[in-house]
C-alpha cells in the first residue's frame, strides 16, 4: 500500500514538472505571428532597462538619423468648456475606444545640430498617424487623428548630446480625421456628394447652415514634448516619455475642434549616416 502511494506521488510530481516546462512563456524574440495576433503586443513600443543612463554625442560635422521612433499613448484627456462663466475649462480624462491600434511606429527623420546650435529632429516619414476615438465620462465620443506629421523638435538645453536629461520640444501638423472623399449621413462631402442637404435654410440658422455644408480641409497644429530618460550608447537606443496636445476632428470645419492631451512612452534608435 505504501509502495503504491509512493509511486502515485512521484507520478503526480513528474506530471507537474512536465506541465510547468511545457507552459513556460516564449522569449519575445521568438514569438510567431500566431503568438502576437490578438495579444496587443504589436501595439507596444520597445523599452530600455532603467540602468541605461549613458549619453550619445551628436557631432556638428556629421548627419544622423532617428529611426524606429515609436510613440505609445497611455492616457488621453479632452478639454471641456466650463459650465459656469467664471470657471476655467479643464482637461477631462477619457477612455480609448480604438483597442490595440493606437501606437505610431517606424517613424524616421534627420537629427543634427542646427545653425542656432540646437539639436534638431525633423520627421520625414513612417507610420506617423493613427485614427482613434476616445469617450468622455458623459458618453460623448471624440474622434481624432493621433499624429506627428512634419514634426520639427529642438533640444531645450542647447546641448550637443542625447542624455537622460534631454527634452525635445516642437510642433507638427494635424490633418483631418477623414479623407476628402468622405460623405456624411446626409450625402454631403468635400469633393463628392451634395452641396446642401436642405432647400431653403431658416434665416436664423444661416451661419450654422453654412458651416454644415461648406466643407473645408483644414490642417491643424499640435505640439509635443519628448523627455528622454534612458539612453544606451552601445546600441544607439533612447527611450522616455512624451506629452502631446493637438486638436480633435472638426468634421471638415462644421464644428469646433477640442484640444486633446495625450501622454505615453516612446522609443527610438540613433544611427550615424556614412558620408
Image (cartoon, helix red, strand yellow):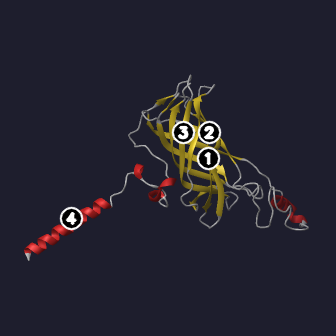
The residue carrying mark 4 is 14
Quadrant in which the N terminus appears: bottom left
Q: Residues within 10 Å of mark 2 (few under 14, many from 20)?
A: many
Q: Which mark is residue 67?
A: 3
Q: Earlier in the sequence, mark 4 or mark 3?
A: 4
Q: Earlier in the sequence, mark 3 or mark 2?
A: 3
What residue is drawn where x is 67% and y is 54%? 248
Q: Can residue 88 be seen by looking at this rendering?
A: no
* Residue occupying the far top of the picture: 61
Q: Can residue 205 be seen by looking at this rendering?
A: yes
Give the vertical position of 33 relative to 70 (above or below).
below
Q: Are marks 2 and 1 in contact (CB under 8 Å)?
A: yes
Q: Are marks 4 and 2 in contact (CB under 8 Å)?
A: no
Image quadrant assignment for residue 204:
bottom right
Mark 4 or mark 2, whichever is nearer to me = 4
The residue carrying mark 2 is 123
Q: Residues within 10 Å of mark 1 (few under 14, many from 20)?
A: many
* Element at label 4: helix
Q: Earlier in the sequence, mark 1 or mark 4?
A: 4
Amino acid at each position: 500500500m505504501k509502495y503504491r502511494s509512493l509511486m502515485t506521488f512521484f507520478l503526480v510530481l513528474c506530471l507537474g514538472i512536465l506541465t510547468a516546462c511545457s507552459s513556460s512563456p516564449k522569449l519575445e524574440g521568438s514569438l510567431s505571428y500566431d503568438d502576437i495576433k490578438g495579444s496587443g503586443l504589436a501595439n507596444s513600443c520597445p523599452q530600455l532597462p532603467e540602468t541605461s543612463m549613458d549619453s550619445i554625442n551628436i557631432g556638428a560635422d556629421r548627419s544622423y538619423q532617428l529611426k524606429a521612433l515609436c510613440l505609445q499613448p497611455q492616457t488621453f484627456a479632452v478639454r471641456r468648456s466650463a459650465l459656469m462663466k467664471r470657471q476655467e475649462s479643464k482637461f477631462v480624462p477619457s477612455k480609448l475606444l480604438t483597442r490595440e491600434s493606437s501606437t505610431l511606429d517606424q517613424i524616421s527623420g534627420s537629427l543634427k545640430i542646427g545653425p542656432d546650435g540646437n539639436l534638431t529632429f525633423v520627421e520625414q516619414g513612417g507610420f506617423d498617424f493613427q485614427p482613434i476615438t476616445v469617450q468622455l465620462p458623459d458618453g460623448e465620443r471624440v474622434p481624432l487623428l493621433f499624429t506627428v506629421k512634419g514634426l520639427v523638435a529642438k533640444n531645450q538645453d542647447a546641448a550637443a548630446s542625447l542624455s537622460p536629461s534631454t527634452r525635445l520640444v516642437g510642433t507638427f501638423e494635424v490633418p483631418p480625421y477623414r479623407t476628402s472623399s468622405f460623405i456624411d449621413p446626409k450625402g454631403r462631402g468635400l469633393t463628392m456628394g451634395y452641396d446642401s442637404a436642405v432647400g431653403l435654410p431658416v434665416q436664423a440658422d444661416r451661419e450654422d447652415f453654412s458651416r454644415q455644408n461648406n466643407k473645408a480641409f483644414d490642417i491643424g497644429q499640435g505640439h509635443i514634448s519628448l523627455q528622454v530618460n534612458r539612453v544606451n550608447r552601445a546600441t544607439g537606443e533612447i527611450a522616455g516619455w512624451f506629452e502631446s496636445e493637438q486638436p480633435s476632428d472638426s468634421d471638415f470645419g462644421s464644428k469646433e475642434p477640442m484640444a486633446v492631451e495625450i501622454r505615453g512612452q516612446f522609443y527610438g534608435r540613433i544611427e550615424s549616416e556614412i558620408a
